[in-house]
Image: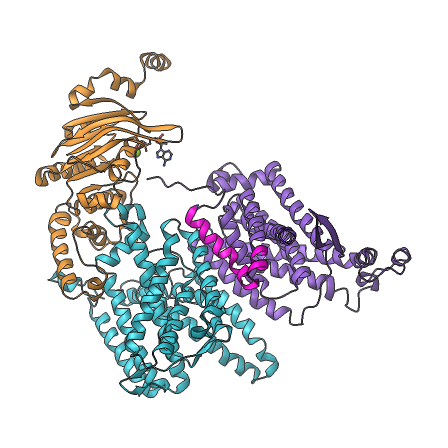
Chain colours: A cyan, B purple, C orange
């Protein structure tokens, strides 16, 4: 049984890794991230890259939905903006240094985030949900139309560039992984830091009681827009990496489906928690893969049965959303917390 | 000018259908405070049910032949040798379709009602009292469940479904220009508006209507006054599913069946927010406005622009009037 | 310190405030009393910027703040507590109180996200200051890491006071700080209020229904009834003002009627 967690300096108490379990957990995860690409095959690396990119986007959504308490059904749009910005940059200036592309993608997506965040200054909850839903359709509309076809490829989509670092082109899945994983770790740590300091606390305050936050001197206007900008920026980063990771992109990749998937990853993982996006994304992206394996095992690869796979995946996806909301609205992180609480009290209590 | 009136008429007709769809969203919101993002998919189910009962079932082997095609002697006499697209021929076709249209409507209404009650019981009831966020997201989850289920159930290619009214072209002159519309559209328009008006009257004057309005005002007080609140919830979902079934049948006969119908429901959501979530009148105005704007966009800018009209419009309206045209503003007291 | 001049506020037909004028003198406790619905909370709301008065002025140190945004007023040093608790329910006691330091800290998005360096220094300084001036002072040390949502009502009220105190305010508005508390908790709270006044010389505005407490603490009392200011002055003078007695006990006629009925 662990009886307490004592500190003699405020600095230790305020640290992110204020106990040994967290310190070890973090160290082990880093080790895992480094070792993984050497033992994984291409399929696993493909999945891992996809998951890492999604984690960034979901962490961004978490800033807005989980911490600031503002609803969004439109973050797929910012993802798309990040991806297409990366493509456009490489179209205009081939061979741009990838980190520059990344930063520009983030900035452009953040700017759009502010634009579509404007309704948040006037409405909350449901109205905001529909306003952001509109962002989805409007952004995709412009991507599909012929006006920007040179950059976006219109409805037919476009091929995407590979990242080139100092003359080395990242072609293999493994090489791309080594670009994506560190960016993910840095962005997650940044978000984690944000929410233990002044800036992040202000966002949480807005979520919990907006008028109370206001009289504490927090400007709702500026913080809500900043929150939109940050979360859109994270999605923009994810979009940029997505463009580097996959050989081609289509407007459909970033539709309502993606916006909802991001949200579902967040809910499944746990909103307003650092680990939430990580757990949730892994679950939501891995379940369809497992389903695929199960279906092909049960049917022995029967072509007729394959037909049922896609509707079944949809049903499972929908049921997972509803199931989480009904049975575990705080997400996987809550289960994780319960587990650790149990361990720390064992054997005296459950 | 002539073109303008033509598109105005088209817009009003599609506006009336938007309004019919919107009723379902408003009714559910008013009584349960849930905004149903899956309403479009309820409509899609209505459409597929209509297809099942009006097309698939009558063609089944065990069905008497008159269900699929009812041709009493007097009808054949009436038709005589009327021209292909003439009024007489259209009416005769409609009459011979009547058994299956009725079967389709009754079937769709019943099946959709059962579906809605299941949803209300299994999904919405357990979430009672949860946050708006959970409510929204659970109906979003329903979208996937319903879409997947439709994909499993209706595997065959969907064919043409019979229109609710006889379908012949009507030509007439107004302000010196020739205008044109299909009679079936006119029938749809009338059905939609009648249903809309009827429901408003029901809500105003009947017992269950008053119960719904009381619940809309204040759930717990309504409960305290002896109103059976769970029954109010079921009633609201029934209203939504049944208007949805008819809207589904209309949409299926207008634009054909497709899984994309569900997404159409999302644009109606935008319309509803524009009108004001809790105001039937506001929603009617918004529906007509969007119907007309869409038609105009179609005319001047093309179909893909028309598709995003509701979304742009709702953004603009929310920025100017956060609670829509006639929606009630919720005041926050501290 | 804080002057309200001819303030008027109405909601549709209801006049929540009508020609209210008074001055809260620096370092003193000004109590605002009145029957339910008299407009006391509304008065606080126009002072802290939640509503704009339709007419009249609010002066803070002789600067007009009538149209200033609420968050800007916090920067001037106006802090308040709410009649119905308005804590950040998803946070711990410590985080709630830290928010009081928001206006004094400087770190923005980048420094916060990077953390090490200025943000860390600032946070640690804030923590030390809060521990000393708020947590120790209000005797909250046993619950500093508890989520506020699980605390009993009396403690939540105290945390809210702590949060306002962490703003190091010049003017502190307390909206019914002891409503619903028992004798002991009320006495604790009264002691804290006096200590705050003594230790920091804070100007305090106090809305309270507990007359005993008001008469003990207040240097000045303002009485509202149906939005109108019917009396102001020292506790003693107000207590014997016939208009006040009437407002609280009803008119002569109704008093007699109720006497007869009993
Ligand atoms: N947002 C609002 N909209 C409409 N009326 C309001 C609003 N806020 C307050 N009022 C009305 O203004 C009047 C004064 O209310 P206020 O809350 O200021 O009273 P109070 O003196 O604080 O009463 P209590 O002792 O019950 O707290 C009341 O009639 C109240 O109903
Ligand atoms: Mg009050």
Picture quarter with the C terminus of chain B: top left
Q: Where is residue B188 in the image (x, y as percent from the top left)?
A: 68, 52
Of the four image quadrants, the one with ligand 1 is top left
Q: Magenta: predominant secondary structure element?
A: helix
Q: Total marks drawn?
A: 0
Residue in view at x 88 percent, y 55 percent: B78
Residue in view at x 38 percent, y 83 percent: A45
Q: Is residue B143 positioned above or below B214 on the image?
A: below
Q: Is residue A172 left or right of residue A2?
A: right
Magenta residue span: B295-320
Answer whether residue B270 is visible to the viewer in this image: yes
Nearer to the camera, B331 or B83: B83
Quadrant in the picture for residue A29: bottom left
Does the magenta run of residues contain B307? yes
Q: Is residue B292 positioned above or below A309 on the image?
A: above
Nearer to the camera, C226 or B312: B312
Nearer to the camera, B290 or C78: B290
Quadrant in the picture for residue B88: bottom right
Q: Where is residue B324 in the image (x, y as percent from the top left)?
A: 47, 46
Q: Where is residue B123 in the image (x, y as percent from the top left)?
A: 51, 57
Q: Position of residue A158 (x, y in %)?
A: 45, 77
Nearer to the camera, B143 or B259: B259
Q: Is residue C238 left or right of residue B178?
A: left
Q: Is residue A128 positioned above or below C241 on the image?
A: below
């Amino acid at each position: 049984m662990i009886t307490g967690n004592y500190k003699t300096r405020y600095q230790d108490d305020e640290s992110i890794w204020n106990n040994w379990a967290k310190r070890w957990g973090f160290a082990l995860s880093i080790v895992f991230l480094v070792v993984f690409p050497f033992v994984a095959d291409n399929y696993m690396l493909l999945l891992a890259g996809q998951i890492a990119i999604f984690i960034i986007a979901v962490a961004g959504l978490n800033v807005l939905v989980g911490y600031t308490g503002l609803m969004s059904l439109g973050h797929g749009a910012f993802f798309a903006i990040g991806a297409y910005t990366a493509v456009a940059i490489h179209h205009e200036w081939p061979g741009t240094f990838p980190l520059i592309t990344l930063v520009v993608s983030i900035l452009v997506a953040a700017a759009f985030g502010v634009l579509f965040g404007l309704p948040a200054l006037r409405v909350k909850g449901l109205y905001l949900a529909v306003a952001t839903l509109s962002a989805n359709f409007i952004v995709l509309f412009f991507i599909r139309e012929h006006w920007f076809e040179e950059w976006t490829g219109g409805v037919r989509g476009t091929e995407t560039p590979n990242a080139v670092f100092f003359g080395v082109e990242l072609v293999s899945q493994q090489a791309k992984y080594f670009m994506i994983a560190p960016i993910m770790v840095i962005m997650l740590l940044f978000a984690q830091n944000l929410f233990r300091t002044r800036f992040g606390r202000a966002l949480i305050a807005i979520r919990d009681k907006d008028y109370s936050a206001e009289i504490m001197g927090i400007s709702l206007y500026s913080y809500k827009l900043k929150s939109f900008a940050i979360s859109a920026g994270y999605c923009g980063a994810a979009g940029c990496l997505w463009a580097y990771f996959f050989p081609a992109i289509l407007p459909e990749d970033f539709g309502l489906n993606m916006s909802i998937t991001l949200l579902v990853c967040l809910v499944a993982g746990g909103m307003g928690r650092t680990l939430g996006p990580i757990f949730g994304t892994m679950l939501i992206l891995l379940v369809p893969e497992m389903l695929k394996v199960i279906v092909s095992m049960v049917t022995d690869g029967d072509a007729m049965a394959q037909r049922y796979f896609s509707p079944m995946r949809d049903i499972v996806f929908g049921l997972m959303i509803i199931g989480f909301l009904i049975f575990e609205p705080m997400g996987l992180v809550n289960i994780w917390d319960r587990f650790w609480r149990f361990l720390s009290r064992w054997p005296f209590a459950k | 000018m002539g073109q303008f009136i033509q598109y105005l008429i088209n817009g009003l007709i599609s506006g009336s259908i938007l309004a019919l769809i919107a009723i379902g969203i408003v009714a559910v919101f008013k009584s349960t405070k849930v905004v149903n993002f899956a309403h479009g998919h309820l409509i899609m189910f209505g459409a597929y049910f209509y297809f099942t009962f009006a097309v698939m079932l009558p063609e089944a082997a065990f069905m008497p032949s008159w269900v699929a095609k009812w041709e009493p002697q007097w009808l054949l006499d009436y038709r005589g040798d009327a021209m292909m697209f003439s009024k007489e021929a259209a009416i005769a076709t409609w009459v011979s379709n009547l058994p299956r249209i009725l079967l389709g409507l009754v079937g769709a209404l019943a099946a959709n009602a059962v579906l809605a009650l299941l949803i209300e019981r299994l999904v919405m009831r357990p979430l009672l009292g949860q946050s708006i966020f959970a409510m929204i997201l659970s109906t979003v989850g329903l979208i996937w469940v319903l879409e997947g289920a439709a994909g499993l159930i209706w595997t065959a290619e969907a064919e043409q479904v019979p229109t609710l009214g006889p379908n012949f072209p009507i030509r007439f002159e107004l302000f010196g220009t020739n205008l044109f519309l299909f009679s079936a559209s006119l029938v749809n328009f009338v059905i939609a508006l009648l249903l809309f008006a009827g429901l408003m009257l029901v809500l105003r004057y009947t017992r269950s209507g008053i119960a719904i309005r009381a619940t809309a005002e204040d759930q717990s007080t309504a409960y305290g006054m002896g109103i059976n609140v769970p029954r109010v919830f079921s009633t609201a979902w029934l209203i939504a599913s049944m208007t949805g079934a008819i809207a589904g049948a209309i949409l299926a006969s207008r634009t054909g069946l497709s899984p994309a119908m569900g997404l159409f429901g999302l644009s109606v959501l935008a319309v509803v927010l524009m009108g004001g979530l809790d105001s039937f009148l506001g929603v009617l105005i918004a529906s007509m406005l969007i119907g007309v704007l869409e038609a105009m966009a179609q005319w001047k800018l093309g179909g893909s622009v028309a598709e995003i009209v509701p979304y742009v419009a709702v953004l603009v309206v929310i920025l100017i009037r956060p609670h829509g045209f006639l929606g009630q503003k919720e005041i926050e007291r501290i | 310190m804080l002057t309200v001049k001819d303030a008027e506020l109405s909601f549709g037909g209801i006049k929540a405030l009508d020609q209210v004028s008074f001055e809260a003198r620096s370092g003193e406790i000004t109590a605002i009393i009145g029957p339910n619905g008299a407009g006391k909370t509304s008065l606080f709301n126009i002072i802290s910027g939640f509503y704009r008065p339709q007419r009249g002025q609010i002066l803070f140190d002789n600067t007009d703040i009538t149209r200033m945004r609420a968050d800007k007023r916090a920067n001037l040093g106006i802090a308040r507590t709410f009649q119905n608790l308005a804590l950040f329910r998803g946070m711990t006691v410590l985080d709630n109180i830290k928010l009081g330091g928001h206006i004094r800290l400087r770190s923005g998005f980048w420094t916060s996200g990077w953390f090490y360096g200025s943000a860390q220094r600032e946070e640690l300084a804030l923590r030390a200051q809060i521990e000393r001036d708020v947590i120790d002072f209000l005797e909250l040390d046993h619950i500093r890491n508890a989520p506020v949502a699980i605390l009993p009502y009396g403690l939540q009220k105290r945390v809210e006071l702590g949060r306002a105190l962490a703003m190091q305010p010049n003017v502190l508005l307390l909206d019914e700080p002891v409503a619903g508390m028992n004798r002991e908790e009320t006495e604790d709270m009264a002691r804290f209020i006096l200590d705050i006044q003594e230790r920091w010389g804070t100007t305090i505005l106090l809305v309270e229904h507990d007359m005993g407490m008001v008469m003990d603490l207040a240097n000045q009392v303002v009485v509202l009834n149906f939005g109108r200011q019917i009396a102001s002055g020292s506790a003693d003078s107000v207590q014997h003002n016939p208009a006040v007695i009437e407002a609280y006990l009803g008119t002569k006629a109704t008093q007699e009627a109720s006497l007869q009925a009993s």
